[in-house]
Image (cartoon, rainbow, N blue to C red):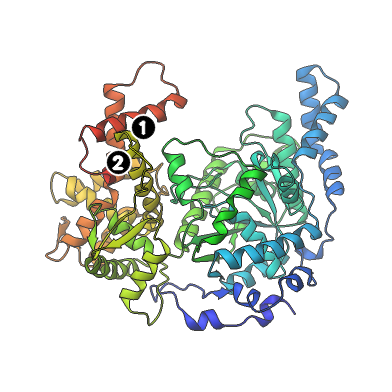
Amino acid sequence: MSYLGHRSLMYKQGSSHSQDPMLKRDGFEDILEERRNSSDLKYALRCYAPVLYKGVTPCKANMLKNIVLQSDQLRYVINQVSQESGEAPDIIQEEASVILEEMAHRLQISTVRFFAFALSKAFKTLFQHVCVNEEGIQRLQQAIQEHPVVLLPSHRSYMDFLLMSYILYTYDLALPVIAAGMDFMGMKFVGEMLRMSGAFFIRRSFGGDKLYWAVFSEYVKTMLRNGFAPIEFFLEGTRSRTCKSLTPKLGLLNIVIEPFFKGEVFDVNLVPISISYERILEESLYARELLGVPKPKESTSGLLKARRILSEDYGSIHVYFGQPVSVRSLAQGKVNRSTYNLFPRHIPRKPMEETQSFVNDTAYRIVRLQEDNMVLKPWVLMASLLLQNLEGMELSVLTEQTVWLRGLALSYAAFLDWPDHAPTAKVVSSSLALHRGLACVSGGRVSLVVGEPLGPVTPEEALFNRAVSVLSCASYRNQVLHVFLRPAMLAVAMHTAASSKKNEVYNCFSFLWDMFSNDFILCPGDTDFEEACYLLVKTGAVQMPQQDIVMTDIGQPTLSFFNGLLEPFLQGYQVVCRYLCEEASEGLTEKQYIPAVRSFAVKLILAGAFTSLSELF
């Protein structure tokens, strides 16, 4: 019997996820419940027999490499490169073989079983719960049997890809092959173990390396066309250090959709997956990276040093497997696939404009789906309030405003995990206890924690320590931005417009939309202005008599909160504009730009040009 057949329902019965009753979302099961009550060794060594795509026979790693090297598309590119470089095709073929050897996964069930055992031990130590929507798992199980599947998880932590494989192994589903950066390959022993658990390694950028691109794209498409395993990659391309969604990268998505355009597969299922961490393992590391501290190089010694995190409590993880998205259904009426019949399939072609537009729209749609199913904990609401009150708040006031913000978030269909039947004061105190490294209670007031210096510090060092605290807290506030973004943009537009006329407010909203389009997931063609108006009217913050948009008598707290929510981002743009006008020199490179703006911002803050750090961060 599969894992799905005998799961306990204790977590579902003991807790619920508050949500808009009109918005159907699945419940969750805690997969650590069984791990705490049975043998991890038996779990790792149990019979593992996943159902595969149309009953295909699993393909050995060496056989997969041979299929790729003998493909018509790769041979065509090898001949092209040979003619351009003047080198013999055999030499280019050997180069392709070396690239593929460096890139390819070598999935071995013995290594997977080792990770299953080790991760069970680690997860039980680190997390209180790892919660999965089993209805989503059932949908995925069906999708894997029907069409090639591409798994698209959100990316907030190094833990993401390990967690994904762990969950699929737990539910007896086919393990994915995972696109990973070359950084991991350099880790002694660990890099090879990741390769043997399904990772394939790719360069961060290919430049104009035609051969590398051909090997990489053919390798991915061969796995997809034959349905050997689900393919997994992160649309955002890298971990989000700010914990808000990043603009999607389109390269890999283009590759996995192309076989459908060329008629090589009937359909491709894209599965958006939302991974929500109650407490992020890398929270302080991310803050330091954003402040210019170099990212630590991935290494085995660094991994061993990180063992100290095993003594910490990181709360719960929620993993939501979304409804599979059919590429065939999405493309209906948008892409004319017949044009692909005009050329031999093996000849690489630059994507047509309508194809690029379709892939771009699909990428944004998937990230929006990831956002919609992110589970929010009470702390993200508390962090949002604390960042607008950096001088601190009375605990009673924080509790009262958290309850108010909870109601607002639920009215906007936020996926909020709030413990049933628990007094609000207990919910707030539990959140503060879990995040005691970021906020503390003293004398009945709650304030952010700033690291204590060991000795005398310069004003710049003191500011750095304060900024680490603020940015760490901001990473939690950012998790709720997708819920409030559109009404917040409307609130700012109302505040800055020359009048209350709807067209004036709309013009300001459009300006903000254009400005923030690289900061947030804003999809061209979406009715964001209408949605923002609807939500603010729904919660009684504004009313719209005839052609005006005006604040109601009870709307001030809501609009004030929303203005404060976006103020740090607006101030950030102001700092950049001031720097470009006042200090930027000719020939400024991108590498010089970010440190220069950071230094300029420090100078402004120390000179008192900003009343609070939140205006910068």
Q: Which residue is drawn at 50% across and 35% down?
A: 294
Q: In this view, does 227 lie to the left or right of 134?
A: right
Q: Nearer the viewer, residue 594 or 495?
A: 594
> Which residue has dot 1 on it?
598
Any part of residue 322 in sight: no
Give the x, y percent position of residue 78: 80, 29
Q: In which quarter of the image is the N terminus?
A: bottom right
Q: Earlier in the sequence, mark 1 or mark 2?
A: 1
Q: Which residue is drawn at 74% across and 30% down?
A: 211
Q: Residue at x 22, y 52 (%)?
A: 391
Q: What residue type is labelled 1?
A: Arg
What is the secondary structure assignment of the residue under circle 2?
loop
Q: In this view, does 470 lie to the left or right of 88?
A: left
Q: Which amino acid does label 2 sit on?
A: Leu
What is the secondary structure assignment of the residue under circle 1?
helix
Image position of 8 with respect to 329: above or below:
below
> Which residue has dot 2 on it?
616
Residue 394 found in image quarter: bottom left
Q: Is residue 345 left or right of residue 329?
A: right
Residue 99 found in image quarter: top right
Using the image, tell me which numbered label, if any, was put on residue 68.
none
Any part of residue 581 in sight: yes
Give the x, y percent position of residue 344: 75, 38
> Residue lying furthest front in this view?
455
Q: Residue at x 31, y 57 (%)?
A: 384
Give the x, y percent position of residue 603: 28, 30
Give the x, y percent position of residue 120: 66, 66
Q: Answer whether labels 1 and 2 touch (C-beta < 8 Å).
A: no
Residue 395 found in image quarter: bottom left
